[in-house]
Amino acid sequence: MSPRADAVRSRERILEVARRHDARSLRLNDIARDAGVGIGTVYRHFPTVRALIEALSVETLVRLGAAADRALTEPDADAAFRGFIEDAVVLQLQDGGLETVLTDLALTDPDLHDECSVARGKVFAGYDAVLSRAQRDGVVRDDLSVAQLQRLICGIEHAVRLGAPADRDLLLDILVSGMRPGTLDSSAATATAPIRRTATIG
């Protein structure tokens, strides 16, 4: 076997083993041990845990990008938005490293994982397109940003992990309902204003 073929095989073996670990608590030493390779081999392919997480998330990013594409072909903007939000939550629950890949951009080294950067760029564009369409069609309030939407989805992911899988649909319903235009009317805003003014920390 050529050195190049051997390197490809070892990389795939590392990724195969890493997929069986919780992406939120990966340790390169553990991966090397379970994959039956030296720690130096792991570091040659993935010099940091972040690099390994990004490599593991490429497939999920591609699937999330495809979910956005499907949403944009759905004639009903309301169903399209709800379907995309649900797909995003499901994928983040399946891939524990996806939240980090989508939100901690300062830790990304584009020279290491161009494939990940490209896939993530498509996801960001998909988020923007789906949200913009929903806002244009009056399905979602127009003051919600893509970054805020992503953080809300991360919040649902965390809530489901803390609770139970059966909580997902209820939490999604609450999230989507809260993003409707005019969810907080003037009477509700007036009623809650005194509470906001008197609330203190410390």
Image (tube, rainbow, N blue to C red):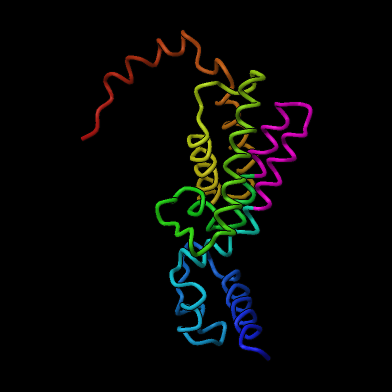
Q: Residue placed farthest to the bottom in the image?
A: 1
Instruction: Write the start and end of the magenta stretch as one range.
Output: 62-87
- The x and y percentages for residue 92 are 58, 51
Image quarter where the N terminus lies is bottom right
Is 78 magenta? The answer is yes
Which is more toward the observer, 164 or 21?
A: 21
Q: Where 134 sits versus 65, above or below?
A: above
Which percent across, then down, holds residue 42? Answer: 50, 79
Chief SS of the magenta region = helix
Question: Residue at position x 65%, y 26% from top?
Answer: 133
Q: Position of residue 5 (x, y in %)?
A: 66, 83
Give the residue displayed 50% in from the left and 16% down from the top. Answer: 184
The number of numbered discs placed on residues in the rendered structure image is: 0
Of 147 and 151, nearer the camera is 147
Q: Residue furthest left?
A: 202
- In the image, what residue occupies the spot 62% across and 53% down? 61
Instruction: Quadrant for the C terminus, please.
Output: top left
Q: Quick check: 61 left or right of 186?
A: right
Q: Which picture quadrant has residue 58?
A: bottom right
Residue 41, position in %: x, y?
50, 83
Residue at left offset 53%, top offset 65%: 22
